[in-house]
Image (spheres, rainbow, N blue to C red):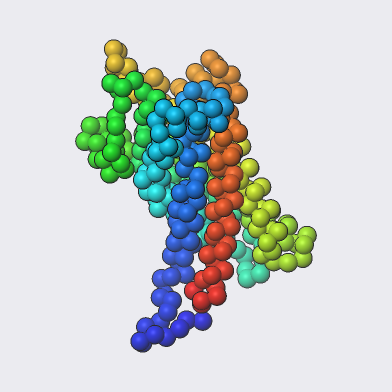
Amino acid sequence: SAKESAGTAWPPSWWPAAKPFVNGGTAATIGITIFNPIDVVKTRLQIAGGGSPFTLGAKMVAQEGFGSLYAGLSAQYLRAWTYQTARLGAYRSFVDLMTPASGQVTPLWQKAVAGLSAGAIGAVVGNPAELAIIRMQSDKTLPEAQRRNYKGIIDALTRVVRSEGVLALWTGSAPTIVRAMALNCGALASYDQSKEMIDEFVGQKNSRTGIAGASMLSGVIGAVFSLPFDFVKTQIQRMKPDPVTGLMPYKGAMDCFSRTLAEHGPLRFYAGLATYTTRIAPMITLTWILIEQISAFEKTYGL
């Protein structure tokens, strides 16, 4: 129940609507601080077309220093505060709206629709940060004369707008949106559904077994669903014009998809799968566990 403090209701009336977004953003910020090095290696592997993540990581540290594993961290934080906050908050809000009545279970198809919608909203909001992350993480792979050498997220976004226009911040937005929809449909809907099934099996609601099991399953499903779209998004967002012809490597997402399929086959879209799953699955798992812990903490203090 709300507590009265100095004549002001606490928590404030806007808190229930804001809570899913605050919880999601907080959990995502903690998670990306831990997992950024794996994300950097995943991006480099996609550019290289595969390889050993351990060999590549060791090579990066030897040649570029330990800090290279935290390339694009400022952009990752912006992404957590935009994309992650929007998708996690919107999903929980949509599911709450769709729930038939108190105590009843939301059907799986409605959870999937909520995940698709939340992913699309989050991707549109977070695309500028996504663009900056890919460019900052892949900059060292370019010839020295072609490197952008962004100083941080503010410098990256400012220079993109100045040299390429405001709309360039949404470069690769189509594959980003599709990737986010696939990831969120797989990860968010599967978490709620599997958690309900595990809880029913063990006979306890919000059980630790349910949270842990559903979190891990959600991470793996989300990774498998989304990697092909992530691959295309990475290729589109890191493009630079050819120094001689001035032409971009790809005309768009579909061109990238069709040419990659024709030249390298379908398995190329799963380059870096082990690293991607190692990055995505634990990140999703940790995010869900953190959200549950944050929610439990808030419940203890009447929030």
Q: Residue at x 57, y 35 (%)?
A: 275
Q: Residue furthest left?
A: 162
**Where is residue 113 shown, x and y percent of the image?**
57, 50
Q: Residue furthest front?
A: 62
Q: Would you say 125 lies left or right of 254 here?
A: left
On the question of residue 279 being in view, the answer is yes
Q: Residue furthest top?
A: 244
**Where is residue 115 shown, x and y percent of the image?**
55, 50
Query: Number of marks in the image?
Result: 0
Instruction: Choose between 115 and 267: the one closer to the eye.
Output: 267
Instruction: Choose between 132 and 21: the one closer to the eye.
Output: 132
Instruction: Choose between 114 and 3: the one closer to the eye.
Output: 3
Q: Would you say 163 lies left or right of 301 here?
A: left
**Where is residue 132 shown, x and y percent of the image?**
35, 38
- Looking at the image, residue 270 lies above or below residue 9: above
- Looking at the image, residue 208 lies above or below residue 53: below
Q: Residue at x 50, y 45 (%)?
A: 35
Q: Residue at x 32, y 17 (%)?
A: 242
Which image quarter: residue 199?
bottom right
Q: Residue at x 29, y 35 (%)?
A: 150
Which image quarter: residue 196?
bottom right
Instruction: Choose between 75 and 194: the one closer to the eye.
Output: 75
**Where is residue 220 shown, x and y percent of the image?**
63, 42
On the question of residue 89 being in view, the answer is no
